[in-house]
Image (cartoon, helix red, strand yellow):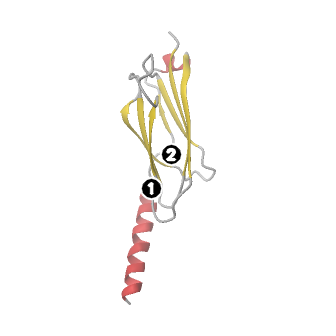
């Protein structure tokens, strides 16, 4: 009976985490000034492709650029969920972003799922 109790507790935790994960945003767009975004150049692009772990989540932290800063402030950030089933995860900007010269992005997968994202950073040409 004790084994069944542990199994039930693990099942309840897994279901509650997967239900909570359904309300997160799978893609992210931040272009505070769309007029500037249209005339911007792609200054960085990163593909994130991590296989899932069936007993938990995956957290990936990405810094763009990898070292230093961009020559001009970021005008637009596009983060696109490329997963075929829309399983995505939670995206958050943890540092910098639009109007800064760098961005730090953290993506966390849904429980038992992987990560497959394209991150694009744009900056003005002038």
Q: In the image, residue 31 lies at what x, y percent? A: 47, 26
Mark 1 neighbour density, 10 Å: few (under 14) some (14–19) many (20 or more): some
**Rendered residue at 41%/73% (across/down):** 10
Q: Where 67 sits versus 6, above or below?
A: above
- Foreground: 108 or 33? 108
Q: Quadrant of the N terminus?
A: bottom left
Q: Mark 1 and mark 2 in contact? Answer it, CB < 8 Å.
A: no
Where, by quadrant of the figure, is residue 72 drawn? Answer: top left
Look at 43% across and 24% down and name the residue there.
Answer: 32
Callout 2: SS: loop
Real-space CA distance between mark 1 and mark 2, rounded to the nearest whole angstrom: 10 Å
Q: Position of residue 67 (x, y in %)?
A: 43, 28
Residue closest to the far front: 67
Q: In the displayed image of the protein, which residue is found farthest to the top?
A: 126
Q: Position of residue 26 (x, y in %)?
A: 50, 45
Mark 1 / mark 2, whichever is N-terminal? 1
- Going 42% across and 31% down the picture, which residue do you hit? 103
Q: x, y (%) of residue 81?
A: 56, 43
With respect to residue 2, does 18 lie above or below? above
Residue 57 marker? none
Which quadrant of the structure image shows residue 100? top left
**Residue at numbered disc 1:** 21
Residue identified by numbered label 2: 26
Kindly state the secondary structure of the residue where label 1 is placed: helix
Foreground of the two, 69 or 73:
69
């Amino acid at each position: 009976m004790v084994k069944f109790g542990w199994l039930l507790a693990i099942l309840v935790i897994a279901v509650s985490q997967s239900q909570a994960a359904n309300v997160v945003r799978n893609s992210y767009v931040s272009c505070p000034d769309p007029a500037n975004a249209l005339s911007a150049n792609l200054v960085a692009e990163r593909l994130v492709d991590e296989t899932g772990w069936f007993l938990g989540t995956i957290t990936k932290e990405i810094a763009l650029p990898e070292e230093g800063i961009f020559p001009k402030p970021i005008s637009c950030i596009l983060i696109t969920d490329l997963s075929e089933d829309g399983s995505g995860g939670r995206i958050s900007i943890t540092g910098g972003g639009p109007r800064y010269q760098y961005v730090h992005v953290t993506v966390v997968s849904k429980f038992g799922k992987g990560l497959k994202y394209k991150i694009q950073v744009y900056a003005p040409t002038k």
